[in-house]
Image (tube, grey):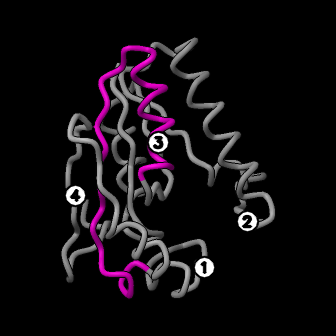
Amino acid sequence: MRVEILSGVSGSGKSTYAWSRTKEIPKSGVVSADLYFCFNGEYNFDPKKLSEAHGWCFRKFIEELRRNPHGLDLVIVDNTNTTEAEIAPYVLGAQAYEAEVEIITFFCEPEIAHKRNVHNVSLESVMRQHERFKIRTFPPWWKVVPFGWGKDETANSL
């Protein structure tokens, strides 16, 4: 089994990428804190429940690895993951279950990401995410893959 941990600011194209991968690889699944806020097909974000959503997402991730009920070839973690501390539990969980891990980083100008994020994340929040994203450093043994849309491209061009 493989695990792809997506990392990038809100609106950088992570979810578009994740769901396009599930079309490419039929035996794949996505875990995301965003899914915690989806009810009857509608997204109802509550910032007071963000910590709860991330805990729920991590538990779902471990369930997929532990039971692998669908015989998945790929599990995608679709959260902002802008710091090493946010990514580390997923890396360690994947390694504990002997999954191959890649961290796919999405580079996008914050102003562009803000304009196209679908969850109405404020520009100030996207800028804070971007600042955390810029200063992080990964352990050299983590496999990090850059993935950028450039200034004029969009995630929708997949």
Coordinates of residue 117 in the picture (x, y in percent): 49, 75
x 77%, y 52%: residue: 40
Q: Provide the residue designation for mark 1.
A: 120
Q: Which mark is residue 77?
A: 3
x 28%, y 42%: residue: 139
Q: Which residues are magenta?
A: 84-113
In terms of sequence position, does the residue under pointer 2 or pointer 1 come before the other? 2
In terms of sequence position, does the residue under pointer 4 or pointer 3 come before the other? 3
Distance, label 4 to label 2, CA atoms, is: 27 Å
Distance, label 2 to label 1, CA atoms, is: 10 Å
Label 1 Cα neighbours within 10 Å, binned few <14 / some 14-19 / many ≥20: few
Does residue 54 lie above or below 143 as drawn? below
Amino acid type, label 4: Phe
Label 3 Cα neighbours within 10 Å, binned few <14 / some 14-19 / many ≥20: many
Q: Which of the 4 image quarters holds residue 106?
A: bottom left
Amino acid type, label 2: Phe
Count of picture labels? 4
Coordinates of residue 153 in the picture (x, y in percent): 21, 76
Coordinates of residue 59 in the picture (x, y in percent): 65, 31
In terms of sequence position, does the residue under pointer 2 or pointer 3 come before the other? 2
Distance, label 3 to label 1, CA atoms, is: 21 Å
Q: Provide the residue designation for mark 2.
A: 45
Q: Circle 2 sits in a helix, a strand or a loop, which is it? A: loop
x 60%, y 72%: residue: 119
x 80%, y 64%: residue: 48
Q: Which of the 4 image quarters holds residue 28?
A: top left
Q: Are the residues flagged by discs 2 and 1 in contact, CB closer than 8 Å?
A: yes
Q: Provide the residue designation for mark 4.
A: 147
Q: Are the residues flagged by discs 4 and 2 in contact, CB closer than 8 Å?
A: no
Where is the N terminus found, in terms of image quarters? top left
